[in-house]
Image (cartoon, rainbow, N blue to C red):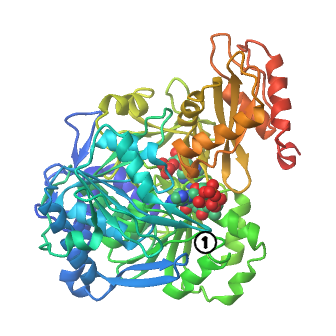
Amino acid sequence: MGYRETYDAWKADPEAFWLEAAEAIDWVEKPTKALDDTSAPLYEWYADGVMNTCWNAVDRHVEAGHGERTAIIWDSPVTRTRQEITYATLRERVARMGGALKARGVGKGDRVIIYMPMIPEALVAMLACARIGAIHSVVFGGFAAHELAVRIDDCKPKAILAASCGIEPGRIVHYKPLLDGAIEQSTHKPEFTVIVQRDAEECELIPGRDFAWHAFQAKATPCDCEPMAGTDPLYVLYTSGTTGQPKGVVRPNAGHAVALAWTMKNLYAVEGGDVFWAASDVGWVVGHSYICYGPLIAGCTTVVFEGKPVGTPDAGTFWRVISEHKVKSFFTAPTAFRAIKRDDPHAEHLARYDISCLNYLFLAGERADPDTVNWAADKLGVPVIDHWWQTETGWCMVGNPAGLELLPIKVGSPSVPLPGYDVQVLDEAGHPVPAGTLGAIAVKLPLPPGTLPTLWNAEERFRKSYLSHFPGYYETGDAGMIDADGYVWIMARTDDVINVAGHRLSTGAMEEVLASHPDVAECAVIGVADELKGQLPMGFVCLTKGVNRPAEEIVKECAALVRQEIGPVAAYRMTLVVDRLPKTRSGKILRATMVKIADGESFKTPATIDDPAILDEIRTAVKGLGYPHAKAEA
Ligand code: COA
Ligand code: AMP
């Protein structure tokens, strides 16, 4: 069946579609029903099914005779290491780690935070939790201690699994002091931690609280997979919302496994034995779905890459990994390609490698700009497939299902809704708009299996953030349109979330940090266009009356504060000291207008503005930083 027939089959009978898709995974007890709508608009999938995600990702492949197949290739240019781990070895390691955690009292439903760089132990940790039914919450290494502390207090982990350090080009990231700092700051204290001691840096362990990874499990008895209800959470992954308090996206076990299995075959066009590579990080949803669970559930070989698209050691690294490991489908963020294109505009490094194994390049995480898509397609000679999804959904909402049927590519559009997603564009009143008209992008409820059923400990926030604005729909937070051919075009966020190098960040969180500076009376943070990272944060601060320290000092302190509180990943460097912020008469800061000024876009002065003269002050201020860039102004 092609795309249209498959989508129509889903729409005609979603229950039958998802029960059939459920055949792709192993069950302890098969579900008799796919959808449980008894608590609508909160929905659950495979509620009476019993299964284990780790069994599906690891054990079943060994049982099927594929124990000697490579499960994980760890390719780490920053440590000059390459390692292959078979499915049989992975099972052994995961079962032992699971056994060790169980022996220390971690069980079904307990939370475990994982704070690790891109090393195989990160996947072992995730799978060990899945095996024993503990709920993992992976925190990205680029976040600072405070962000880690916020997550510790929200999900209250029994244990934290971490590493001594991460390795960024040119510097070692000392994870252990960050971890210690976070535990000191948090109200909730984990019972113990387990630390992978890396060659690059061994850290000090606190006796009785910290255990070294190897010693911790040396004497452990390997454990079996815990039978889990389909709706039991597999993990909680925090993502940025509009405030400093991140949202804990809950991922249920069964729907997740079924949906990922479906996408590996029908979207990414790979099957057992193929090599699949997602160059992201386990700290993001892409890492959860397509570095760890998706490829392993499908019996593929997954590449765990500890490096960058450029500088480790050069802009040919991606081509080396693809050719050396025979990658068939490759997934990364457009910003990575922009970085390569900037370093090696003619892709001269490509000449050194044979990448004929590669069938498709998949891009997601931010808007795939036509320049980048065209460059990649031209240089690699394979279809470049943009696809759109979010942490909340866990898998692709709109894409080009290459495994089913490669549809014509329209550069700039991620193509069409996948089965499971009835994507609509709505006006402010919640009515679908005609083709070609801009509006809020929403998905008719219920969302398909694998998507978030709620937020961790925050059901009200879940309803308020996603379900209340457009009753009967899930509000995505993105705006765009659907054209006459049914292709979806994603244009912008409708909230204060920005996307910096494919990383989703909250300007609200940055504002909270700036506001904590003793000399800042008021502030606003916006996302401005950046050629490499897509967007960069820019802060505007008004100083407290009577402060007459040099502005440069305060500007420096603001950058340091955001780095210290949120982390280097925010890439927060630009602060402007201004006298006033543009506001409506009711006091709402006109952030959208400020963005337009900084990006050199035309705009109408809002009718509700309190004092239009402030816009000129903002224009003058951003000019001082070289904004808008010449290209944007042209
Ligand atoms: N642990 C600790 N620090 C980290 C980190 C991690 N896992 N990841 C990034 N950082 C730090 C970086 O060292 C950098 O710090 P600096 O300010 O001291 O230089 C900062 O966070 C910003 O990092 P990054 O976003 O990686 O920017 P960069 O300028 O170093 O590199 C790119 C630019 C485009 C090469 C890089 O952003 C990239 O590879 N992007 C792909 C993004 C991606 O895969 N996103 C996944 C979403 S699907
Ligand atoms: P995250 O939850 O970090 O995956 O970020 C999700 C957000 O990133 C989406 O809501 C979009 O704003 C943006 N995004 C992700 N993929 C795309 C894409 N293919 N095109 C445009 N925006 C995207």
Query: Toward the viewer: 513 or 329?
Result: 513
Query: Toward the viewer: 211 or 512?
Result: 211
Q: Position of residue 341 (x, y in %)?
A: 73, 68
Please name the residue shown 41% across and 58% down the image. 176
Above or below residue 371? Residue 446 is above
Q: Position of residue 110 (x, y in %)?
A: 20, 50
Q: Is residue 485 visible?
A: no
Q: Report the residue marked by disc 1.
A: 383
Disc 1, ligand 2: is the CB inside 8 Å?
Answer: no
Q: Is residue 434 visible?
A: yes
Above or below residue 352? Residue 54 is above
Q: Position of residue 593 (x, y in %)?
A: 72, 28
Query: Toward the viewer: 530 or 550?
Result: 550
Please name the residue shown 67% across and 47% down the image. 535
* 107 sits to left or right of 565: left
Residue 177, image quadrant: bottom left
* 348 sits to left or right of 259: right
Check disc 1: other Cα within 10 Å, few if <14, some if 14-19, many if 20+. Answer: many
Image quadrant for the N terminus? bottom left
* Number of numbered discs on residues: 1
* 464 sits to left or right of 382: left
Please name the residue shown 68% across and 70% down the image. 376
Q: Amino acid at mark 1?
A: Pro
Q: Position of residue 204 (x, y in %)?
A: 37, 63
* 415 sits to left or right of 200: right
Disc 1, SS:
loop
Query: Toward the viewer: 219 or 141?
Result: 219
